[in-house]
Amino acid sequence: MAGRWRIAGLIMAGIGLTCGTMAHAGSEKPRNPADEAVYKDRFAAFLKDPGNFPYAPMEPLKGARHYRVLPNATAAKSGIRAATLETARAYAESNRSTAFLVWHKGKIAARWYGSGVTAQTPLVSKSLAKPLTAIAMGRAIALGKIKSLDQPLAEIMPELVGKPKGRILVRHLLDMRSGMLDQGFSADPEHPLNRCYIGLDHGDCIINDYPMISEPGRRYAYANAPSDMVALVIERATGTRYGDFIAREVLGKIGAQGGEIWVNRPGGLAHSGCCTLLPAETWLRMAVLLVEDGLWNGARLLPKGYVAEMRKGTPQNPNFGLGVWIGEPYKPRRGFGAPGAPGPQVLHSEPYLDPEMFLFDGNANQTIHISPRHKLIVLRMGPTPPAQPEWDNATLPNLLIRGLKK
């Protein structure tokens, strides 16, 4: 599924409930028969292969009016040894990658695409969309549409006044401390994990039916629901549909190509927490925006200090900030759920050579590593790498840092 979970080990432990037996708060509401027929078809497709669920319908996501490809560095001036770049490219290719990009100090040092993929091909992002939600929030704050990361949702969405979800702060949707239920799997079509993900009114479902299991800010729980709620918050705060806001205030401002975004129904609410399709270089540009502290060509797009906030962990999970993962403190294996919870664990064979390293990380090892110290970014996108030899999150960034010319 769109979040970083495989079927094995998906039912989360230690939260006082099991996903298969929880009461369904919205199951008694009257439902439109036509919508129900669509939902049943979606659910059947989802059960067949949750990791490759076909996103539909999709809407165009406009890019910049005038797009220019990021400049390439010559081999002599890339700042990285040619042999190192080739070794890194070979590692990416051997791990079923379809896109591999290296950016160093303002220019592209390596650009490689697999069979059938070009610089214009929109790629499935999985949870790379979660850092995009943080960028969108930062842009809305910079525009004065949202007061701050610490604004409670009740001030933006009046229907949440007096309710537990109204006490969620904007930052809690980004750092996964909303208090809402962890990501998981259920074969029950009525379960909120399903209704609030693939339903035709998933936003309403998240607001009214998705379970709160703790007070906001007290517990880390990685999930799609809080990240999908970002689209609602952006739309309420700005009066603009989420995809249009992203197109105008993010992609347009960084000169990026557009793609497609998944919506729950034609003209409906976008899924902000996953599944946006954009070319590899568009994702790279978002990382460049962050490594440049929210500036693009000298223009400030994100509030001063906002990127530093993104890179701060929380007491509940020191390795997760606002939509991004943080390299320190070092862990040989880092999961996606709460520290110590069951679930997939990603290998980090050694600490990052830049202790300030942070990254975008989506399902199937979609990774964009960002090294502030070396002004270095490496992107890998594509299908899930082979099980053996195991994908190592430390390999590409550390290989490239070791290959920097003195």
Image (tube, helix red, strand yellow):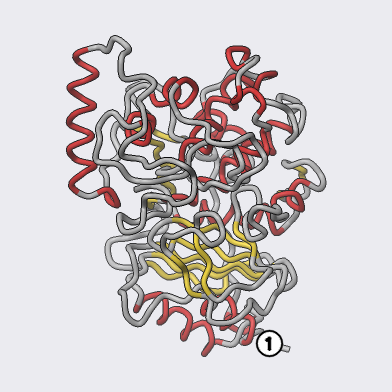
Left or right: 105 as drawn, with respect to 102? right
Residue 319, x across and y down, in percent = 63, 60
Q: Disc 1 residue type? A: Lys
User: Which of the two residues, 334 or 211, is positioned nearer the viewer here?
Assistant: 211
- The residue drawn where x is 63% and y is 65% is 370
Residue position for label 1: 405
The answer to whether residue 366 shows anywhere in this view is yes
- The residue drawn where x is 55% and y is 35% is 246
User: Which of the two residues, 272 or 32, is positioned nearer the viewer here?
Assistant: 32
The answer to whether residue 295 shows anywhere in this view is no
- Local crowd size for mark 1, using a 10 Å CA cut-off: few (<14), some (14–19), many (≥20): few
Indicate the secondary structure of the residue bearing disc 1: loop
- In this rendering, the answer to whether 372 lies above or below 189 is below
Residue 228, x across and y down, in percent = 49, 34
Residue 405, x across and y down, in percent = 68, 87
Furthest-right residue in view? 304
Left or right: 150 as drawn, with respect to 340? right
Which quadrant would residue 271 be assigned to in this image? top left
Residue 79, x across and y down, in percent = 66, 81
Left or right: 119 as drawn, with respect to 154? left
- The residue drawn where x is 63% and y is 43% is 135
- The residue drawn where x is 52% and y is 90% is 83
> Which quadrant, please, contains the C terminus?
bottom right
Which quadrant would residue 28 be assigned to in this image? top left
- In this rendering, the answer to whether 233 lies above or below 292 is above
Furthest-front residue in view? 16
